[in-house]
Image (spheres, rainbow, N blue to C red):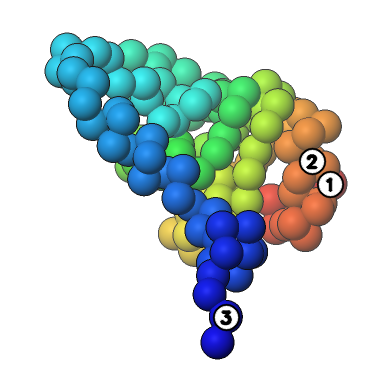
């Protein structure tokens, strides 16, 4: 019968360093007044973000430069608020530099649901990165950005 050696990869725990780090960090005092950064990179607090406030029905709604999964829930709330204020929604995607699958899925579903309700939704001036991501995920036709 063999015994596990220190260099044996079968007995190696690749996550062991996490336990050591947790034990050492648990001894450090926690600053309860420290500000916690928002995970929604590219999206701000709705009270502070004037870019998604209700605009006139002709004015496009600008999207932030970064749209990712951390901001999808907030973006969803903001877009839902527009459904009640307009008969037509124009979304300006010209500033979008980075967009992930979750954000594109949200825009596709939002557009489809709005169209079912008789509301016109268009994405105006999409950036090249927005179009490239939409094509990569095969939703460019659904968003009409080709």
> Mark 2, mark 1: which one is toward the viewer?
2
Q: Which residue is mark 1?
A: 146
Q: Quadrant of the N terminus?
A: bottom right
Q: Residue sitting at 74 percent across and 37 percent down?
A: 130
Nearer to us in this view, 43 or 88: 43
Relative to residue 42, is residue 101 depicted above or below? below
Residue 10: x %, y % from top left: 60, 70
Secondary element at image label 2: helix
Whether residue 59 sits left or right of residue 143 in the image: it is: left
Q: Residue sitting at 82 percent across and 42 percent down?
A: 132
> Mark 3, mark 1: which one is toward the viewer?
3
| Disc 2 packing (10 Å; few <14; some 14–19; many ≥20) | many
Secondary element at image label 3: loop
Q: CB under 8 Å between callouts 2 and 1?
A: yes
Q: Residue sitting at 31 percent across and 30 percent down?
A: 24
Disc sitting over residue 2 in the figure: 3
Relative to residue 115, is residue 20 depicted above or below? above
Picture quadrant of residue 98? top right
| Distance in Å between CA atoms under marks 3 and 2 | 59 Å
Nearer to us in this view, 18 or 115: 18
Residue 75 visible (yes or no):
no
Q: Which residue is mark 2?
A: 131
């Amino acid at each position: 019968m063999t015994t596990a050696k220190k260099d044996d990869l079968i007995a190696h725990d690749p996550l062991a360093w996490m336990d050591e780090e947790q034990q050492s960090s648990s001894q450090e005092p926690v600053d309860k007044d420290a500000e916690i950064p928002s995970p929604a990179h590219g999206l701000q607090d709705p009270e502070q973000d004037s870019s998604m406030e209700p605009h006139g029905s002709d004015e496009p709604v600008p999207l932030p430069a970064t749209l990712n999964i951390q901001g999808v829930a907030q973006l969803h709330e903001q877009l839902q608020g527009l459904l009640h204020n307009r008969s037509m929604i124009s979304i300006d995607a010209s500033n979008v530099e980075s967009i992930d699958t979750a954000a594109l899925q949200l825009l596709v579903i939002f557009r489809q649901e709005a169209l079912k309700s008789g509301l016109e939704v268009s994405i105006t001036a999409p950036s090249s990165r927005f179009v490239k991501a939409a094509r990569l995920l095969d939703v460019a036709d659904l968003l009409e950005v080709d």
